[in-house]
Image (cartoon, rainbow, N blue to C red):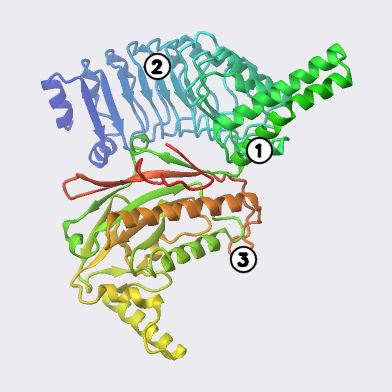
């Protein structure tokens, strides 16, 4: 049998950790029909990872001999079955079986008394094994992207008093039991049922669940029940003292004012509104029970009228605010990075980038409005691209990491927007011919302002460009973007870049203005509901969205990986912009 050098080395050096992943390992697994048996003799291992091996479809029962394992990572394979003897790994704390083809989990998992993290996301599971309440140290369970229709009854057990994170998005969950309030530690990520097909049998039942989650879980910090079938939000929610973030977006609330608030306001404003609503309901109930006179009610109403008007005015002002939330690099390990070459210093040295989520381009003429706004910024603030240039890309079409570099004009190849692939020399020549033709049509002596930016490249031996990981040029500032990353109505995440030969602050000012304009447009789109495809591009109906934008930081670094700039930073988006709230 072929010897595996990684396993021999681990045995010789008495290693406690072993990682096997990638094509080389996958080929070995394919050739012998599984993992080599010698791996099960490494009894000193406390960490074992076998990942990204599509040929791995099962794990042998000899896994039970690795009794010192604390972490077993078997993600991104094609596993169809896990042996029952996995319950023999009494020291196991972390079990990751995500991104496989599992249709069921072995009952043996319930015997893992030390288990604190279970990740079985992205499989084909329809049920969870009963008895998980025996794993009393569980703190995190991720069952997202499966076919699960309900939680096992004992998942709500009081024995799971450490369970703080339960992620169940993208499933087929039909009912949420009121027993969930027995999980006192449920706090971080709390209950992610986003994009699940939630169908609560009775509205009252679900309100009961929410109320008890909030009242009894005093450590509750994050509550996400977006995209469900809620009609009401219980006012008791405002009694949770540590609640910092709530998400009720995508629910058809009967209180339309509240529905508007949950789609555009901060958590504090929503909780204040619910608190006031709860007081009002309580007072009305007491009045009815005690039979207070109409005169006394009138006096109370008059007494509160002034304060109520002020409160409503504050709420109305809050509703009109645009919200931009900044996502830090530390929150997203996979965030894009742009490496800047030293050669751009003599051509076009300044660059800032970021990614934006939450921009609705699908509704009606939203995409056209965005492109027109970008053109106006180019004409005004960017001085018809002579001061700075904006480029926008579909982030999902980007292959990172990116490189900001220079190329000789004859070697720079790009597929410009609406054109075939050509070199920079060919493109510039075409644009000059178009500019000259336009000058003749307009009967002018000089080239129009629209084409003045072409003069910025005259005499340059190298042209600036943004290149993706596949070596394709996706941006050629100040000339054009690439057709490869062109934004469309279906674009859900945008990558923004601003370049300039002037200075870094110019790039930041333009990017600030672009994000503010995007927030304005997104708010307009949310408030003026249009049918998707009204311009003939996409006939599908639009989905209801929030006007809040999420701006994710992007770092630009030099060739050695040293930070050049990160946008946005605390000093960005800091101008006194009316009706804009930036959440850091």
State the image coordinates of residue 375 (x, y, percent, origin top left): 46, 66
Name the residue rendered at 70%, 22% in the picture: 278
State the image coordinates of residue 10 (x, y, percent, origin top left): 16, 24
58 or 314: nearer the viewer: 314
Q: Work out whether mark 2 precedes mark 1 in sequence or the reverse, and give the earlier one.
A: 2
Say which element carries label 1.
Answer: helix
Name the residue rendered at 41%, 39% in the picture: 327
CA separation in Å, label 3 and label 2: 52 Å
| Quarter where residue 230 is shown | top right
Name the residue rendered at 59%, 32% in the picture: 269
The image shows residue 530, relative to residue 433, as above or below, that is above
Q: Residue furthest left?
A: 12
Give yes or no for contact between labels 3 and 1 (Cβ–Cβ under 8 Å).
no
Name the residue rendered at 29%, 30% in the picture: 50
The image shows residue 465, relative to residue 553, as above or below, that is below
The mark lying in front, picked from 3 and 1, is 1
Residue 202 in view: no
Disc 2: which residue: 116
CA separation in Å, label 2 and label 1: 48 Å
Say which element carries label 2.
Answer: loop
The mark lying in front, picked from 3 and 2, is 3
Disc 1: which residue: 313
Disc 3: which residue: 536
């Amino acid at each position: 049998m072929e010897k595996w050098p990684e396993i021999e080395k681990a045995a010789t050096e008495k290693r406690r950790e072993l990682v096997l992943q990638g094509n080389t390992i996958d080929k070995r697994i394919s050739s012998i029909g599984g993992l080599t048996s010698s791996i099960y003799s490494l009894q000193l291992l406390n960490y074992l990872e076998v990942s990204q091996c599509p040929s791995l479809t099962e794990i042998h029962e000899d896994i039970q001999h690795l009794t010192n394992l604390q972490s077993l990572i078997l993600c991104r394979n094609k596993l169809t079955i896990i042996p029952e003897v996995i319950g023999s790994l009494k020291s196991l704390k972390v079990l990751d079986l995500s991104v496989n083809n599992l249709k069921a989990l072995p009952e043996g998992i319930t015997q893992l008394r030390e288990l604190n993290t279970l990740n079985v996301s992205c499989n084909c599971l329809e049920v969870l094994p009963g008895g998980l309440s025996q794993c009393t140290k569980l703190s995190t369970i991720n069952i997202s992207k499966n076919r699960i229709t309900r939680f096992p009854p004992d998942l709500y057990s009081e024995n799971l008093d450490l369970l703080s994170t339960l992620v169940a998005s993208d499933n087929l969950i039909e009912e949420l039991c009121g027993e969930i309030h027995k999980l006192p530690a449920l706090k971080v990520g709390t209950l992610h049922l986003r994009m699940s097909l939630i169908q609560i049998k009775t509205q009252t039942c679900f309100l009961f669940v929410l109320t008890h989650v909030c009242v009894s879980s005093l450590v509750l910090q994050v509550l996400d029940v977006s995209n469900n079938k809620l009609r009401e939000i219980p006012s008791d929610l405002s009694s949770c003292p540590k609640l910092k973030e709530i998400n009720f977006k995508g629910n058809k609330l009967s209180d339309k004012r509240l529905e508007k608030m949950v789609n555009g306001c901060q958590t504090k404003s929503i909780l204040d509104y619910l608190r006031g609503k709860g007081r009002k309901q309580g007072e009305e109930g007491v009045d009815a029970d005690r039979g207070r006179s109409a005169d006394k009610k009138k006096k109370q109403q008059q007494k509160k009228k002034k304060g109520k008007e002020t409160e409503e005015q504050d709420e109305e002002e809050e509703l009109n605010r645009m919200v931009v939330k900044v996502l830090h690099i530390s929150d997203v390990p996979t965030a894009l990075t742009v490496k800047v070459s030293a050669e751009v210093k003599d051509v076009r040295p300044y660059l800032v980038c970021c990614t934006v989520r939450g921009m609705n381009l699908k509704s009606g003429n939203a995409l056209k409005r965005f492109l027109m706004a970008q053109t106006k910024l180019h004409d005004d603030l960017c001085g018809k691209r002579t001061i700075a240039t904006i480029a926008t890309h579909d982030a999902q079409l980007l292959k990172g990491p990116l490189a900001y570099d220079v190329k000789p004009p004859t070697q720079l190849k790009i597929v410009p927007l609406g054109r075939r692939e050509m070199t920079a020399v060919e493109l510039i020549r075409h644009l000059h011919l178009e500019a000259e033709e336009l000058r003749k049509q307009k009967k002018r002596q000089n080239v129009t302002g629209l084409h003045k930016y072409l003069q910025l490249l005259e005499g340059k031996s190298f042209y600036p460009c943004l290149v993706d990981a596949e070596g394709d040029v996706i941006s050629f500032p100040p000339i054009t973007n690439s057709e490869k990353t062109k934004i469309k109505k279906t674009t859900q995440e945008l990558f923004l870049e601003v370049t300039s030969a002037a200075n870094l602050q110019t790039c930041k000012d333009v990017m600030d203005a672009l994000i503010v304009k995007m927030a304005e447009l997104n708010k307009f789109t949310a408030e003026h509901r249009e049918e998707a495809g009204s311009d003939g591009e996409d006939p599908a109906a639009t989905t209801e969205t929030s006007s809040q934008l999420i701006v994710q930081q992007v770092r630009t670094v030099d060739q050695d990986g040293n930070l050049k700039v990160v946008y946005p930073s605390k000093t960005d988006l800091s101008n006194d912009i009316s009706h804009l709230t930036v959440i850091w």
